[in-house]
Amino acid sequence: MLPTEQNELITRTGPGTVMGDLIRRFWIPALLSEEIPEPDSPPVQVRILSEQLVAFRDSQGRVGLLDEHCSHRGTSLFYGRNEECGLRCIYHGWKYDVEGNVLDTPAEPPESVIKHKVKHAAYPTHEVAGIIFAYLGPIEKQPVFPAYSWTKLPASHTYITKCFQECNYLQGLEGECDSSHLSFLHREFSQDGEQQLYAYDSAPAYEIEETDFGLRLIATRQAADGKQYVRVSSFTPPVSCWIPARNKEVHTYIPIDDTHSWRWDFGYFPDRPATPADVNRKPEIGPDYRRIRNMANRYLQDREVQRKQTFTGIENFLNHDSCATETMGPRFDRSKEHLGVSDKGVIAVRRYLVDMARAFERGEEPSCLVMDERENDLSHIDTIAEVVPSDVHWREAFPHLTIQSPAKQRDATAATATA
Ligand code: FES
Ligand SMILES: [Fe+2]
């Protein structure tokens, strides 16, 4: 269980909360590039971290992420006109650029200087692999965009979906750090491929190590013929977990408010382009980014399928996860739970978040932020699922999984040599 005070600390994310301010210090996904596909396309509303924002792409293709309410008298800029490198409010015509500068106040007399005095709230963005990331923290604390291995891949090697979750972000995130549920929630009775591995050993052994990017979570299952099935995941604060799906995926949970969140599934192939078949969850998500199978229709569970074919009787792993985490309630009271050995990964991630939030509250800088481009190397974050001989330790099997980035190791070696 998690004491109520700690549960409050890490599940409250609105403005002025510790966890909310902490998440704001990282680059987080805000919207998909496809939502504002081309210059001067219609703006869209973006609700994250209990803030109401509007995103638009200007005539030069630059992305703006602004407070939705006009600085003049608060009308929604979502209804505005996206024209000639700015978003113009429909009420009195005030016009803003992507940085929140007021370009025009046509209802004011020509001698007015009001546009030079007002600065509209705007957040920096970074667009990569079909995702528009945003930084919502203090501008003087802005980190560089992390150099993950996938940021160097062609966009064709990546894919992305987002969908609406009817619960607090932490419930989703915890599911990503919990390997044992694969043997149940996502089970198919066919016993093909990975399903056989999940069925063979439903109580994996866990190892967890702290790294310079967050936590590495290793779940090992016994397998047939003197083998073991090793799954390595990586938790990267504040709200992501890298998991071995059929390839490599990063799952991120962004609070919309304290009882709703966006689930982002980003996948990449280091050595081949992605195909439409790789994004097998896309047909599950409607045009409004809500899942077709959801709590209101009980995830369209089929009891006959549950009897004969799958553990849940629900179609697609995306809906399995949502059913498991949304039905806990909008924001689960973790003082009521009973944790076991199978929850080791979840416990480690919670402890990490609680410690991080408390340190931040004391005025310490969040760990794992990259502030200097020269130290920007996160190529050692990886996620793996492989069957290896039982007598081979995972660290020997995957020697590239290091605690520090290769760049930091080189620096440490050089410093030792000089000393
Ligand atoms: S409220 Fe937007 S211009 Fe007046
Ligand atoms: Fe899952």
Image (cartoon, rainbow, N blue to C red):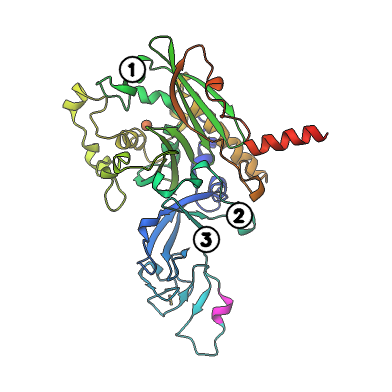
Residue wearing tag 1:
199
Ligand 2, image quadrant it occupies = top left
- Between 341 and 148, the one lying in front of the other is 148
The CB of the residue at mark 3 lies under 8 Å from ligand 1:
no
> In this picture, which residue range is highlighted in magenta?
114-118
Q: Position of residue 175 (x, y in %)?
A: 41, 32
The image's mark for residue 123 is 3
Question: Is 133 one of the magenta-colored residues?
Answer: no
Q: Amino acid at mark 1?
A: Ala
Helix, strand or loop under label 1 = helix
Residue wearing tag 2:
142
Q: Position of residue 140 (x, y in %)?
A: 64, 58
Q: Amino acid at mark 3?
A: Tyr
Label 3: how many Cα within 10 Å (few below 14, some 14–19, many 20+): many
Query: If you read the primary sequence from the N terminus, does the residue marked by circle 3 or circle 1 appear first?
Result: 3
Instruction: Examine the rendering and report whether any part of residue 161 can be seen.
Output: yes
